[in-house]
Amino acid sequence: MGRWEADARGRLQQAAMSLYLERGFDDVTVAEIAETAGLTKRTFFRHFADKREVFFSGAQLFEAGVLASVEQAAEDASPMDAVIGAFAAAGAQLAEYADFQRQRRALIASSTDLQERELVKMADLAGRVVEVLLRRGAGSDQARLAAHTGVAVFTVAYDRWVDEGATADLPALVRRTLEELRLAITPA
């Protein structure tokens, strides 16, 4: 192998996903991922902290999109409307990765390690959304409720989207899921 490897990160991600789908997340090692990509373990660790991060590397872009959208929401938007609008906008970005999202969810469901990491990532995202809402002037409890509810609404909408073959409109599902939550907490 030469000193410079073109698109090493992308090759590692492709190799990892292929191996994870073939054998399951728990049965794949970093060495196998690197070898499949035609790279070394050292190159792997230059790009990723561990084999889970290969799987969650796109989360940073998703998170950045959510946070930017909350930050840029209309001044008069309620905290909940700002959060739901942000998750709907970020969800629109996922549409071009529908096949990957189906595979991703199936792999998460197959591994308690990945389930745990997903929960941690979403909790971290909720915490960062709280910070943005506080800067926008929301009260502490209101910010926490809106952020954590927004994560829950997005998670349910995302699962519905994947279940429907990822052909549905994810942003519309996010908004519809919020309306269903509002109906669920409204007295009969």
Image (tube, rainbow, N blue to C red):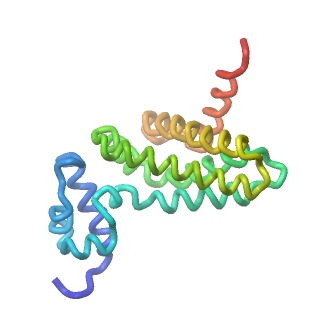
- In the rendered image, is residue 80 in sight? no
User: Residue 74: percent from the left, percent from the top?
Assistant: 80, 54
The answer to whether 131 is drawn above or below residue 156 in the figure is: below
In the orientation shown, which residue stands out farthest toward the right? 76
In the orientation shown, which residue stands out farthest toward the bottom? 3
User: Residue 12: percent from the left, percent from the top?
Assistant: 27, 66
Which quadrant is home to the N terminus?
A: bottom left
Tell me the residue at 51%/47% (across/down). Answer: 123
The answer to whether 45 is drawn above or below residue 122 in the figure is: below
In the orientation shown, which residue stands out farthest toward the top? 188
Left or right: 11 as drawn, with respect to 57: left
Tell me the residue at 69%/27% (across/down). Answer: 182
Left or right: 93 as drawn, with respect to 52: right
User: Residue 134: percent from the left, percent from the top?
Assistant: 72, 53
Which quadrant is home to the C terminus?
A: top right
- In the rendered image, is residue 160 in sight? yes
Please identify the quarter of the rendering in which residue 5 is found: bottom left
Tell me the residue at 56%/49% (across/down). Answer: 91
Please identify the quarter of the rendering in which residue 63 is found: bottom right
Tell me the residue at 61%/48% (across/down). Answer: 87
User: Of 105 and 162, which appears nearest the observer?
Assistant: 105
The answer to whether 135 is drawn above or below residue 114 in the figure is: below
Left or right: 27 as drawn, with respect to 164: left
User: Residue 179: percent from the left, percent from the top?
Assistant: 67, 30
Q: How many marks?
A: 0
